[in-house]
Image (cartoon, helix red, strand yellow):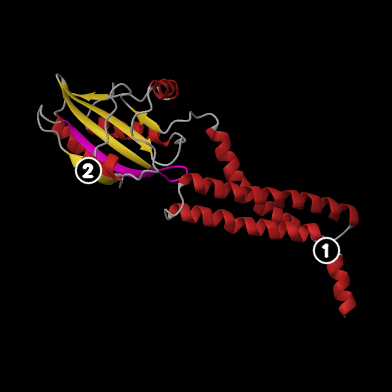
Amino acid sequence: MIRRRLYVEERVSRLAVWSLRTAIFALPVTAIAIALYALGTLDFRSAVYAVLAGVMVSGIALLLALAGFVVIWNEGLRGLGRVIAAAALALALIAPTATLAGLSRGMPALHDITTDTEDPPAFVTLNAARSRHANALAYPGETAAAEQEDAYPEIKPIDFDNPPDEVYNAALSLVTRRKWTVVDAAPPRGAQREGRIEATTRGLPFGLRDDVVIRIRRTTQGTRVDMRSVTRNSDRDFGSNARRIDALLADLSEMQGRRRR
């Protein structure tokens, strides 16, 4: 009985066994990194390094699975099921990261998007509340403005004939409807003070924390709205800030009964 058991174990490919073990090990490495980032224990950069470590382990598991398949095919050993399971698990961990990396190659390395690059809306409350490890809220400058113009030429201010207080209330209702966390809200006060809404939210695809400020200014013809969205802990936003600005201003324009210009 003992000899038979040893014989069966020897006929199972060691590469198949280790490929599956390695793939299973990569799963908690990746999952724990994502969980710690979601809980706020890890910053984005550290979480990316941890996820990449899991992906690298998955790559090793995939190579072991391929080598195991070759050995099984040539020598007739057992373990094909383990090889298939290891390859499937490894690919499931590698594919999302590879896909996002491919998509990000066509996007600019921007984390601060604004409708007014010459006089961007300023953060007041959030500027004091953010940690020292976050990206600076000072606008990056002319280079970032030029890159934004090339990548997102549609991100522009929006003008309304409506009075500032009406536009402010509509903007605040949209922010609340989106369940953003409002940090500060200062309504406009005639010609003495412009309206300002500061909020935080998270953007896709990584759940990056973003800081948002909306500025409502009185003009000679009505009201101008500017918006700025800044990713807090990453040097790129994967397009989330531009999408956020475009979507909110489009909804605001629809609420105010006129098209953007």
Q: Is residue 151 magenta?
A: no
Amino acid beneath label 1: Val
Label 2 vs 1, first from the N-terminus: 1
Q: Residue at x 16, y 30 (%)?
A: 194
Q: Residue at x 73, y 56 (%)?
A: 19
Q: Main secondary structure of the magenta part?
A: strand
Q: Is residue 93 something one can see in this rendering?
A: no
Q: Nearer the viewer, residue 118 or 162?
A: 118
Label 2, secondary structure: give it.
strand
How far apart, in angstroms, are the residues tagged by discs 2 and 1? 64 Å
**Marker disc for residue 241:** none
Dot 2 surroundings within 10 Å: few (below 14), some, or many (20 or more)?
some
Q: Place residue 95 in its image quadrant.
A: top right
**Marker disc for residue 184:** 2
Q: Place residue 29 in its image quadrant.
A: bottom right
Q: Place residue 246 in its image quadrant.
A: top left
Q: Does residue 246 sit above or below 185 in this rendering?
A: above
Q: Is residue 204 magenta?
A: yes
Amino acid beneath label 2: Asp
Residue farthest to the bottom?
1
The part of the chain drawn in magenta is 194-209
Q: Does residue 238 sit above or below 48 in this rendering?
A: above
Quarter of the figure that contains the N terminus: bottom right
Q: Nearer the viewer, residue 90 or 45?
A: 45
Residue 209: image location, x then y, percent: 39, 44
Which residue is tagged 1? Answer: 12
Q: Does residue 3 sit above or below 234 in this rendering?
A: below
Quarter of the figure that contains the C terminus: top left
Label 1, secondary structure: give it.
loop
Dot 1 surroundings within 10 Å: few (below 14), some, or many (20 or more)?
some
Residue 5: image location, x then y, percent: 85, 75
